[in-house]
Image (cartoon, rainbow, N blue to C red):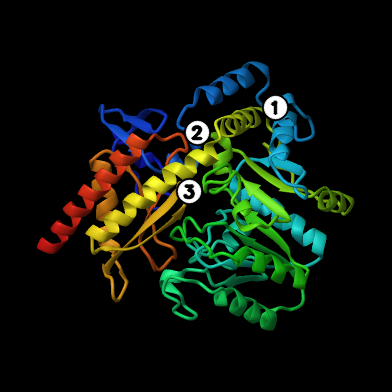
Amino acid sequence: MSDPRDLLIRYGGSFTDGVVASASGSWMQLDDGRRVLDFTAGQICATIGHNHPAVVAAIERAGRDVLHLNAWALSPPVLSLAEHLVATLPPGLERAMFLSTGAEGNEAALRMAKLATGGFEVLSLTRSWHGMTAGASSVTMSAGRRGYGPAMPGVFALPAPYAYRCPIRHCDGTCDCSCLEAGFDLFDQASVGAPAAVIAEPVLSAGGVIVPPPGYFARLAELCDERGMLLVLDECQTGLGRLGAMYGFELYDVVPDFLVLSKTLGGGVPISAMVTSAGLEERCHALGFAHVTSHVSDPLPAAAADAVLGVVVDEDLPAVARARGEQVLAGLHELHARHEVVGDVRGLGLLCGLELVTDRDTREPADELGRALTDECLRCGLSVNLVRGSSAGATNCVRMAPPLTIGAEEVGLALEIIDDALTTVTARAAVS
């Protein structure tokens, strides 16, 4: 009998060994009896832990009431989610649309931005990730660009504020935003006069957990305003407390024209939200804005998201993320002091990264070591993942984004496993 794994299309890398039979909180149970501490919250979606009772109960209620409706029919879960979500947001973000994935949300935001401005040119940061649909993949700079034909016309790249590997001033740890100014200068020279939007993440997660410096987003908003461009903040990985604030933009003292949420919103159920101002929504509606999908405003995912939002607010999980994040970063800095292969440590809240190098002076990315480390961690009962930052593998960063409900003892265990795994794989590499 053939292995059922052979029936699946591989969509980037290989599947891990073992099959997850169940999951609860911060833990996964494999079918062979092993338990694995999930330090990535699934695909950064299990914000309040796997199979949280509130989410399970909401799904059960929706299963009894209504699962799916046509695109223009509304249900209590959708109306409740809209009310509760907007209540957490500042003025200027008061109209919401619910879709299935972050890519869909970003597509909707970019379509609306183009309609509102009449332009089509979009700027996106290098090392960014915004999704794999046609438009979203065109503004994704960290992976998946080669071999698929032309990208969406009018896309321009802004250099990421990556202080550890600065391509502009080699600023070595402290970014002065020269990359931002240089990027807009290049855009101004190349533009055909049809600017529409800038799309950015508060922290570039898939690009290597790159944290922009103070003042970066305030200046970005100014540069957008000067050109009549709208600002889209993709908070699919950072929203709902992940960075230690309810939303990442709160840390930078800006309010975007469009906010996109997904991963952290659904608690493991596919849903995204695109939120904008009443003025932009009314203007685009008058212009005939259309973005209809099979599962827009579906009741079941809205019910799950409403439950997640309630837990995040009621348990003040942004504050928990700050405390646990400080614990993670402190532990990673200790690893940096003990292990020469750790080149850099960075992060905000519970989105943290540990960059591996073969040499701290040259900063040569440790390609093989990164893969060996994640494999060894998994063998020892910890799930972390390696993000490489570009199609060419320009960095090797072990990314950590556990559920916001993770406990201090679990964080301590994860740090111990990473420490031991670093010792094991570096010793193995030295022998080979």
Q: Measuring from the top left, give residue 272's x and y in whole percent.
A: 63, 42
Image quadrant where one finds the N terminus: top left
Q: Which sits earlier in the primary sequence, circle 1 or circle 3?
A: 1
Q: Nearer the viewer, mark 3 or mark 2?
A: 3
Q: Which mark is residue 77?
A: 1
In the rendered structure, which amino acid carries the disc numbered 2? Answer: Ile
| Mark 2 lies on residue | 48
| Mark 3 lies on residue | 349
Label 1, residues with CA under 10 Å away: few <14, some 14-19, many ≥20: many
Cα distance, mark 1 to mark 3? 30 Å
Nearest the viewer among 231 and 173 is 173
Label 2, residues with CA under 10 Å away: few <14, some 14-19, many ≥20: many
Kindly identify the residue that appears in the image at 53 percent across and 46 percent down: 244
Looking at this rendering, what residue extends furthest in the right direction?
A: 286
Nearest the viewer among 216 and 358 is 216
Image position of 76 with respect to 6: above or below: above
Image position of 224 with respect to 345: above or below: below
Cα distance, mark 3 to mark 2? 15 Å
Q: Nearer the viewer, mark 1 or mark 2?
A: 2
Image position of 106 with respect to 82: above or below: below
Nearest the viewer among 52 and 114 is 52
**Mark 2 secondary-structure assignment:** loop
Image quadrant where one finds the C terminus: bottom left
Q: Measuring from the top left, give residue 397's x and y in whole percent.
A: 37, 59
Kindly check if marks 1 and 3 are in contact, taking CB atoms under 8 A apart as contact.
no
> Visible in this render: residue 253?
yes
Q: Give residue 171's quadrant in the image.
A: bottom left
Kindly identify the residue that appears in the image at 18 percent across and 53 percent down: 423
